[in-house]
Image (cartoon, rainbow, N blue to C red):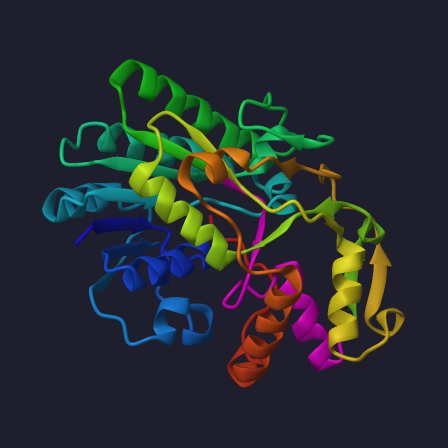
Amino acid sequence: MEKIFVIGSNSFSGASFVDFALQNGGQVIGTSRSAEPIDALLPYKWRDHHNFVFHQLDLNKDLHEIEGLLQSVKPNYVVNFAAQSMVGESWRSPADWFMTNVVSTVKLHDILRKCAFLNRYVHVSTPEVYGSCSGFVKEDFPFNPSTPYAVSRAAADMSLRTFHSSYNFPVVTTRAANVYGPGQQLYRIIPRTILFILLGKRLQLHGGGVSTRSFIHMADVSDATWRIMLSGHNGGTYHISTSEVVSIRELVERICKKLGVNFDDHVEMVGERMGKDSAYHLDSSKVRTELGWAERVTLDQGLDECISWIKKHFEPLKASNYDYTHKP
C-alpha cells in the first residue's frame, strides 16, 4: 500500500486526487490550512473511503508541525497542491502570493530534500509560468510570467531545478491545462456559470470571453498525476492537457445551451482582467508517450457531470459563498 502525503487536500485538485488515490488502494494523509468544507466540495467524501486522515495545518504557519507529521508518517510520496492560486487577485496583495508560493514552499522543499524515506515529490505547478503564447508549447518552453501569481510559481519551479541538480532531489513537476469537474470551487468559470444560470443571476464575462483555453476533466488529471507520481522521471516536467481548444465565450454558450437558456439573457460583458493571458496551450505528448496516459472524459461529458453535480447539491451550494475570499 502506497503511503501518500497530500498537501492542499481541501483544494479541488487535491481533494479529487485524494479520491483517486484512495480508489487505487493508497493510504492518504491530507493537510490544508482550512477546515474541511461542505461535503459537496470534497470528492473524497462522496464514497465510503477508508485509509484517509486529515490534519488542518497551514504551510505558512505550521511548517514545524508538518515536518513532524512527515517524520512520523514517513510517506512514500508527497504531492503538493497548496498554493495561492488566483491570478487577477494576486495584483492586490502580491506579497501574500510570494509568501505562500515561494518562501513557505521553498522552506518545505528544504525539509523534503532531507527525507531519506521519500521516493518522489510531485510539485503541482501551472502553465501560467509561460505567459501568453501561441501554438502548443512543450515542457521546455521559456518562462515569461505576466502576473504576481505566475512569477511566484515560476520562482518555486526554478528553485526546484537547483534542488534536483544539486541534491538529486527526487522531484517531478506537473502543469495541467484548465482543470474542471464536479466539486470545483464555485468562483471558477464552469461551476459559476451553471450556478448563476440556475439562480437567475447574470454572469460577468471578462474581455468578452475571447481568450482561449483547453479544459481538462479533473479525473483525467488525477490519473496522469498518479502515473507521474509512480513512474515519472525525476527532474522532469509533464504537461497534462487536451488538444481541444475553446474560447471562454464558447464554453459559456455551451453551458447555456445545455441548460436551455439564452446566452444574452444571462451574461454581462465587462473589461478584461489585468495581466490575463490570452492563450496558453500545452503539448502533452510527453506524458502520453512515456506513461501511456490519455484523456477519457470529453468536454461535453464533463459539462454534463458538472451540471448534474450542482443540481444534486443545489441547496448547500447555493447557500455557500460563490465568490473568491482571499486568505493571507
Residue at the far top: name it.
166
Asked whether, in this view, residue 174 is left or right of residue 18, the answer is right
Q: Residue at x 36, y 45 (%)?
A: 227
Q: Total label count?
A: 0
Report x, y in % for residue 109.
30, 31
182 part of magenta stretch: yes
153 part of magenta stretch: no
Between 326 and 77, the one nearer to me in the picture: 77
Above or below for 70 versus 159: below
Report x, y in % for residue 261.
82, 78
Asked whether, in this view, residue 30 is left or right of residue 187, the answer is left
Q: Quadrant of residue 311?
A: bottom right
Q: Quadrant of residue 105?
A: top left
Report x, y in % for residue 24.
29, 59
Residue 238 visible (yes or no): yes
Asked whether, in this view, residue 148 is left or right of residue 255, the answer is left
Residue 81 visible (yes or no): no
Between 290 and 98, the one nearer to me in the picture: 290
Report x, y in % for residue 230.
30, 42
Above or below for 104 versus 58: above
Magenta extent: 175-201
Q: Residue at x 58, y 66 (%)?
A: 186
Above or below for 266 versus 133: below
